[in-house]
Image (tube, rainbow, N blue to C red):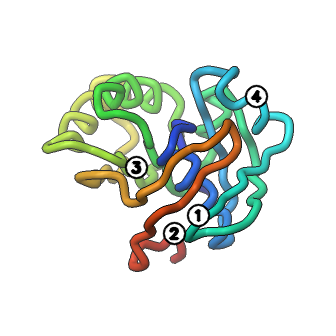
Amino acid sequence: MNITVLGAGNTGLAMAAHAVEQGNQVTLWNRFEEEISHLIDSHTIHTTGKVEGSFKLHLVTTNIEEALKDPDIIIIATPSFVHRYFAEEIAKYLTTDTFILLCPGRTYGALEFVETFKTFNHKMKPTVAETQTAIYTCRKTSDDTVEFYRLNQTYSFQH
């Protein structure tokens, strides 16, 4: 699957690495280039803890239009106060219906996301879901490294 992860913090790096580990093609986007400069050069996330290894990303970018080219899944791994912004931005560039996961979300965050999205794009009808909290206990230890402390074993990016 083609997975786009928006946000390169603790959860974003963990989700991107885990998705690559499971055989997916992953694009990682972040708003601030200085936070992902090592990843732009290497395209590799290093992990320690419950998930060990180095995982090669397909693309690392600060260009949201480029990040949203043909994803099967979009994962928004940012604080919930940014979800409205992403609903507007994704609505501008999304060309196919896709699954969007807010992780972590918040109570009714998916509903607000859908309503905002429809204001800017009434043609596409993405499926939007949210998690109550991050699905990993992890910590970003450098720009390109994340330590996994706990991983929900039932979660999978596979079909």
Q: Which residue is mark 3?
A: 100
Q: Earlier in the sequence, mark 4 or mark 3?
A: 4
Which mark is drawn over residue 18? 1
Question: x%, y% of residue 124?
Answer: 40, 41
Question: x%, y% of residue 113?
Answer: 27, 36
Secondary structure type for disc 4? helix
Pair 2/3: label in front? 2
Q: Residues within 10 Å of mark 1 (few under 14, many from 20)?
A: many
Q: Earlier in the sequence, mark 2 or mark 3?
A: 3
Q: Amino acid at mark 3?
A: Ile
Residue with the most extreme left position: 107
- Asked if disc 2 and disc 3 are in contact, CB closer than 8 Å, the reply is no
- Asked if disc 4 and disc 1 are in contact, CB closer than 8 Å, the reply is no
Q: Earlier in the sequence, mark 3 or mark 1?
A: 1
Q: Residues within 10 Å of mark 2 (few under 14, many from 20)?
A: some
Which mark is drawn over residue 157? 2
Pair 3/1: label in front? 1
Q: CA distance from mark 4 to mark 1?
A: 20 Å
* Residue at image coords 76%, 28%: 37
Q: Which residue is mark 4?
A: 37
Quarter-of-image position of residue 107: top left
Secondary structure type for disc 3? strand
* Residue at image coords 35%, 52%: 134
Question: x%, y% of residue 24?
Answer: 66, 65
Q: Earlier in the sequence, mark 4 or mark 1?
A: 1
Above or below residue 93? Residue 15 is: below
